Amino acid sequence: MTAGFHVLIAGGGPVGLTAALALSRANISFTLLEKYRSIVPEAGSDLVLSPIGLRALSQLGVYNELSAVSTPLGVIQRIDHGGNNLGQFMVFETLKEQ
């Protein structure tokens, strides 16, 4: 490990785990702190990664494994709390075209 400093990562969510992976690959000493007992709490059901996030994961060498267990997101149908249709959100389709 690199001498001279030690990195403290607060949170074991997607960003914290990505930081830990990057630091590990760079041989930089770190400690990751997480308040939950499990890194994967049973809260929520989706994780959406933007193109820039996917690029970072690709640079860390985990894009292919991630792609094998994920589904691309195309169109998001938006509905307000009253059930009214707010239209479609197609940002990921638009980004894919560029």
Image: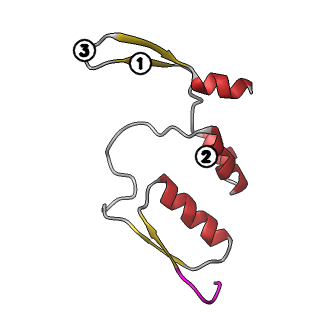
> Badge 1: how crowded within 10 Å, few (<14), some, or many (20+)?
few
- Residue 31 is left or right of residue 79, and the answer is right
- Residue 22 is left or right of residue 85, and the answer is right
User: Where does the image place residue 82, in percent across and percent down from the top left?
Assistant: 25, 14
**Label 1 close to label 2 by CB (< 8 Å):** no
Above or below — where is 40 with respect to 8? above
User: Where does the image place residue 35, in percent across and percent down from the top left?
Assistant: 31, 64
- Residue 13 is left or right of residue 64, and the answer is left
Question: Which element carries disc 1, helix, strand or loop?
Answer: strand
Q: CA distance from mark 3 to mark 1?
A: 11 Å
Residue at left offset 43%, top offset 61%:
12
Inspect the image, locate mark 3, and give the three-letter code of the amino acid beneath it. Gly
Q: Earlier in the sequence, mark 1 or mark 2?
A: 2
Q: Earlier in the sequence, mark 3 or mark 2?
A: 2
Above or below — where is 28 with respect to 87? below
Label for residue 53?
2
Inspect the image, locate mark 2, and give the three-letter code of the amino acid beneath it. Gly
Question: Which element carries disc 3, helix, strand or loop?
Answer: loop
Inspect the image, locate mark 1, and give the three-letter code of the amino acid beneath it. Arg
Label for residue 78?
1
Q: Nearer the viewer, residue 40 or 75?
A: 75
Indicate the quadrant where residue 28 lies.
bottom right
Label for residue 14?
none
Label for residue 82?
3
